Image (spheres, rainbow, N blue to C red):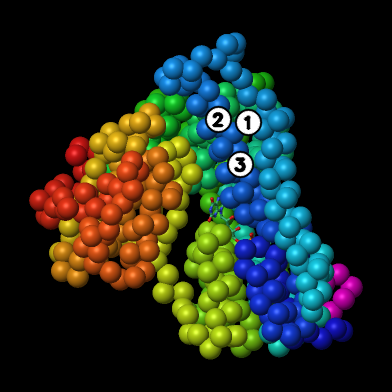
C-alpha cells in the first residue's frame, strides 16, 4: 500500500489543475487515468469537434465563394482523411501537453490504469493499493446507448467512435437533436454527407426557448439537413444500404435508410465501475455523485468534480469545480457552485451563445421582465460578413436593472455573450453598458442599442423574437 496526501481519479478538466495546485502546495499526490490524458474534452469532445467544425466552416465558405466575388476553379470537395489528420493533430497536441505536464510534475505520481474504491480511503489501481484521506473523483461521462429496439443489431457511432471517421458517410442518420447531434449534423452536411436528424421531442435543442430552437431548425433545413421532430418510436434494423431507422413521426416517411447512424441522445456518468458502494459514496438515480455546494460527497474526505457530479456538463463547469475545491481547501475562500451563472455555447454556424435564464424561465418568475431583441439582419457586421442568420435576445429585470439572461444566435455569438456574462457577474445594472463606447463594426456594438429598446414582456407574445 502506498500512502498519498491526495488521490485524484481521472485527468479530465478538473483533475490535472487540482493536481498542480495540491502538488505545488507540497502535497504528495497520485493521479490515475485509465485511457486518454485530458479526458473527453481533449480527445472526443470540445477540442476535436471544434477542429472539425472549423473544417466544415471552410468547406461551407468555399461553397459560398461566389457570394463574396471569389472564383474557385474546379469542384470543391472535402478530403476527409486530411480533415481527420488536422483534428487528430490538434487534439493530440493537447493530450500530449496534459500527459507531459502531469508526468513532469514534482510531488505527483501518475498511474495509468482503471481506479476503483476498496474502501473510503483506499483505491485499487491494477495490483497496487493507494491510500489517502483526500480523494477527488473526476471520472467524467460517456455517451448513452439507448435501449431502443434493434440498437444492438446494427453498427452505430457515438461521439467517441466518430473520431475515427476518415470517410464521408453517404447518409448519416443522427438520433438526437441537441448540442452534440446538431454540431455533428451540420458539420457532416457541410463535408458533403446527406444528414437526417431524428429528434424525439417537438423541438430541436429542447431546453432552449422555442424561438431559438425554431431558428436553429431553419438554419439546419436551409443547409439541406432533413430534420424529423416528434420521432417517438425509433428502432433499427440492418439494411442492404446500411441501416434502416424507423421513426414514427407526425409527418414524413416512417423510415430512413442511412449508411451510418450516430447516437447522440445524452451522456451518463462513469460511476458504475468505480466501486463507490465500498466507500459508501451516494449517487442519485442516474448515477451522478451527490455533492454539496463545495462539491463534497456524503463521505468526508471525498469530493466529486466535473460531469460525474451532475452539476454541470461542460469543460468550463468542470474547471470551475476545480477552482471551487482549490479555493475552499487551499485559499480559505468559500466559493460555491451556486455562485456560477449558467453559460454555454452551441457550436453550430452561426453559434449560439447562452447566459443565465431563458425567456421561458424568466417569464415563470414574478419579475418585471423586459426584453430587448434584434435580428442579425439588422447588425451591420453580420451583413458585411454575409452571415445574417439568427438574432440577439436580452432579458432584463426592470426593477434591479440587472441582466437576467441572453441568447445570441449569430455570427460571433459565442464570444459576444461574454460582454453580458461579465456584467451579470458584476451584478451591474445594464445602464453601465450604455455608457460604454463599443467598437465599430462589431456585433457587440449593438448590445447598448438593444438595451435602449427594451420592451415589457407583457407587451409581447412569449418567444416571439423571430417575428420581431
Ligand atoms: C462531442 C462533445 C462535444 C463537446 N463540446 C463541448 C464544448 O464545446 N464545450 C464544453 O464546454 N464542453 C463540451 N463538451 C463537454 C465536455 O467535454 C465535458 O463536459 C468535459 O470534458 C467534462 O470534463 P470532466 O473533467 O468532468 O471529465 P472527462 O473530461 O470526461 O474526464 C474524465 C477522465 O476520467 C477517466 N476515468 C474515468 N473513469 C476512470 C477510472 N475508473 N479510473 C481512472 N480514470 C478514469 C476518463 O478516462 C477520462 O479521461 C463536449 C462533449 C462531447 C461529448
Identity of the residue drawn at 69% across and 59% down: 38
| Corner quadrant of residue 252 | top left
As rendered, which of 329 and 175 lies closer to the eye?
Answer: 329
Identity of the residue drawn at 45% across and 37% down: 349
As rendered, which of 194 and 371 lies closer to the eye?
Answer: 371
At which x and y percent is residue 111?
A: 82, 69
Above or below, 459 relative to 175:
below
**Disc 3 residue crowd, few under 14, some 14–19, many 20+, Cα 10 Å:** some
* Residue 214 in sight here: no
- The residues colored magenta run 124-129
At which x and y percent is residue 380?
A: 30, 36
Instruction: Determine the quadrant in which ligand 1 lies.
Output: bottom right
**Badge 1 is on which residue?**
260
Identity of the residue drawn at 46% across and 74% down: 337
Q: CA distance from mark 1 to mark 3?
A: 21 Å
**Badge 3 is on which residue?**
51
Is 128 included in the stretch rendered in magenta?
yes
Amino acid at each position: 500500500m502506498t500512502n498519498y496526501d491526495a488521490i485524484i481519479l481521472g485527468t479530465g478538466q478538473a483533475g490535472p489543475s487540482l493536481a498542480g495546485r495540491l502538488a505545488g502546495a507540497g502535497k504528495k499526490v497520485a493521479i490515475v487515468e485509465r485511457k486518454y490524458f485530458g479526458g473527453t474534452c481533449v480527445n472526443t469532445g470540445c477540442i476535436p469537434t471544434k477542429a472539425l467544425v472549423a473544417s466544415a466552416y471552410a468547406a461551407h465558405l468555399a461553397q459560398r465563394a461566389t457570394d463574396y466575388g471569389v472564383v474557385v476553379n474546379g469542384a470543391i470537395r472535402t478530403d476527409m482523411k486530411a480533415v481527420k489528420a488536422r483534428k487528430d493533430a490538434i487534439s493530440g497536441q493537447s493530450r500530449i501537453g496534459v500527459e507531459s505536464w502531469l508526468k513532469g510534475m514534482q510531488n505527483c505520481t501518475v498511474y495509468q490504469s482503471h481506479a476503483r474504491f476498496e474502501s473510503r480511503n483506499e483505491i485499487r489501481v491494477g495490483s497496487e493499493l493507494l491510500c489517502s484521506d483526500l480523494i477527488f473523483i473526476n471520472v467524467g461521462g460517456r455517451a448513452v446507448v439507448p435501449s431502443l429496439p434493434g440498437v444492438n443489431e446494427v453498427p452505430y457511432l457515438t461521439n467517441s467512435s466518430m473520431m475515427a471517421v476518415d470517410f464521408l458517410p453517404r447518409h448519416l442518420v443522427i438520433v438526437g437533436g441537441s448540442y452534440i447531434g446538431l454540431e455533428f449534423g451540420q458539420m457532416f452536411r457541410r463535408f458533403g454527407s446527406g444528414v437526417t436528424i431524428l429528434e424525439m421531442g417537438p423541438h430541436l435543442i429542447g431546453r432552449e426557448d422555442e424561438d431559438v430552437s425554431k431558428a436553429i431548425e431553419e438554419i439546419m433545413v436551409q443547409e439541406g439537413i432533413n430534420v424529423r421532430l416528434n420521432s417517438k418510436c425509433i428502432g433499427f434494423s440492418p439494411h442492404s444500404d446500411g441501416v434502416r431507422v424507423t421513426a414514427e413521426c407526425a409527418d414524413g416517411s416512417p423510415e430512413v435508410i442511412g449508411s451510418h447512424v450516430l447516437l447522440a441522445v445524452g451522456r451518463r456518468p462513469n460511476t458504475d465501475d468505480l466501486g463507490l458502494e465500498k466507500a459508501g459514496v451516494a449517487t442519485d438515480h442516474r448515477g451522478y455523485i451527490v455533492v454539496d455546494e463545495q462539491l463534497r460527497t456524503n463521505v468526508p474526505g471525498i469530493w466529486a468534480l466535473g460531469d460525474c457530479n451532475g452539476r454541470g456538463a461542460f469543460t468550463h463547469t468542470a474547471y470551475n469545480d476545480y477552482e471551487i475545491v482549490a479555493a475552499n481547501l487551499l485559499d480559505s475562500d468559500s466559493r460555491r457552485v451556486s455562485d456560477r451563472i449558467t453559460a454555454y455555447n452551441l457550436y453550430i454556424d452561426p453559434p449560439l451563445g447562452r447566459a443565465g435564464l431563458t425567456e421561458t424561465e424568466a417569464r415563470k418568475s414574478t419579475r418585471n421582465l423586459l426584453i430587448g431583441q434584434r435580428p442579425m439582419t439588422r447588425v451591420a457586421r453580420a451583413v458585411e460578413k454575409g452571415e445574417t442568420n439568427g438574432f440577439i435576445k436580452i432579458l432584463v429585470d426592470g426593477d434591479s436593472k440587472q441582466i437576467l439572461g441572453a441568447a445570441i444566435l449569430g455570427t460571433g455569438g459565442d464570444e459576444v455573450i461574454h460582454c453580458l456574462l461579465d456584467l451579470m457577474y458584476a451584478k451591474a445594472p445594464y445602464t453601465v453598458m450604455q455608457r460604454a463606447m463599443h467598437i465599430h463594426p462589431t456585433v457587440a456594438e449593438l448590445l447598448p442599442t438593444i438595451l435602449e429598446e427594451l420592451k415589457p414582456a407583457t407587451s409581447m407574445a412569449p418567444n416571439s423574437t423571430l417575428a420581431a
